[in-house]
Amino acid sequence: MTAPATAAAMSSAPTISVGPLTPHLYAPDAVRPLRAKEHLLKAATRVELHQHPWPQLTFSTRGVIRLSTEDGSYIVPPSRALWVPADMPHSITLIEDAELRTVYLHAWLAPAWEKCEVLEISPLMRALMLALDTTPDGLPPRDPEAPQRERMIAPLLINELERATQIRIDVPLPTDKRLRQLCEALLRNPADRATLAERAVTIGASERTVARLFQQQLGTSWQQWRQQAVMAHALPLLARGMPVSQVASASGYSTDSAFCAMFKAATGQSPTAFQHKKRL
């Protein structure tokens, strides 16, 4: 079995772009209010921007993914799921080899959340989502009782969603096309330590103009935004138990001590303490 690609390897890997993963073959309806699908995708795969008229839960059983909308980018490790409202354009990038799972929900039973929400997955929520049949339309379900089970699972899954802890691990993205290009370049390769002046050249702007755009578009400085992006990248890696030295390198830090200092300033605890806390 091939080992999953590391975050550092992902940074230099070419992006493989694929179209929407056949959402029309899993459309939820009154008879089947929950529909689930699964795809095993390689690191650096990007599922192109798309949307559909029903909300979804996106998660992975292994591997970290990044889901992006017009407003921001969300890092989703296996311990979390991302709620995406209906009709919201979104794309997905595989940070590692991942088993991507998606649950579509009929609009009449879904929570009325208008924004993306990152949710902690409880053991019960995970079990309910994994119990759903993943056969597409046009083929008989592997489980003949799938429609009945989906209708029984639906109210309990919704209750678990509404009880789930919501987590802030998003990185806001600007509407200005030049600034967004700069931001997305860093999200693709958080280990790149290019200065703001160097990055500004790549989008045909001055450092002063870009700094002003960060304040106007995102209400923050370049340094603050970069730290938020790096933290969103590093936290899932630490939560999975990756050594601090590897996370520091994948986040663009030449020394562990510099990374640890940044992490502690941002969270109030060391990366090692965070890892131990997650194992409790």
Image (spheres, grey):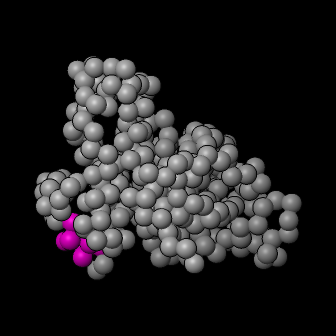
Percent position of residue 228, x then y: 28, 46
Please tell me which residue is depicted at 42% across the width and 39% down the height of the picture: 184
Image x and y of residue 56, in percent: 59, 53
Q: Name the image quarter holding residue 222.
A: top left
Q: Position of residue 93 (x, y in %)?
A: 52, 50
- Magenta highlight on residue 163: no
Image location of residue 207, percent across then percent down: 25, 24
The magenta-colored residue range is: 271-278
Name the side, left or right, on which 102 lies relative to 236: right
Q: Nearer the viewer, residue 124 or 140?
A: 140
Residue 276 belongs to magenta span: yes
Main SS, magenta region, reads helix
Q: In the picture, which quadrant includes the C terminus?
A: bottom left
Image quarter of the N terminus: bottom right
Side of 269 where 106 appears, left or right: right
Above or below 143: residue 203 = above
Relative to 278, say whether 103 is above or below: above
Q: Residue at x 81, y 71 (%)?
A: 141
Vertical arrangement, residue 57 with respect to residue 90, above or below: below
Judged left or right of residue 128, residue 26 is right
Q: Quadrant of residue 279?
A: bottom left
Q: Residue at x 37, y 71 (%)?
A: 240
Q: Is residue 238 visible?
A: yes
Question: Does residue 183 appear left or right of residue 106 in this picture?
Answer: left
Q: Nearer the viewer, residue 146 or 238?
A: 238
The residue positioned 50% from the left and 40% from the top of the image is 69
Residue 91 placement: quadrant: top right
Q: Is residue 157 visible?
A: no
Quick check: 101 above or below 211? below
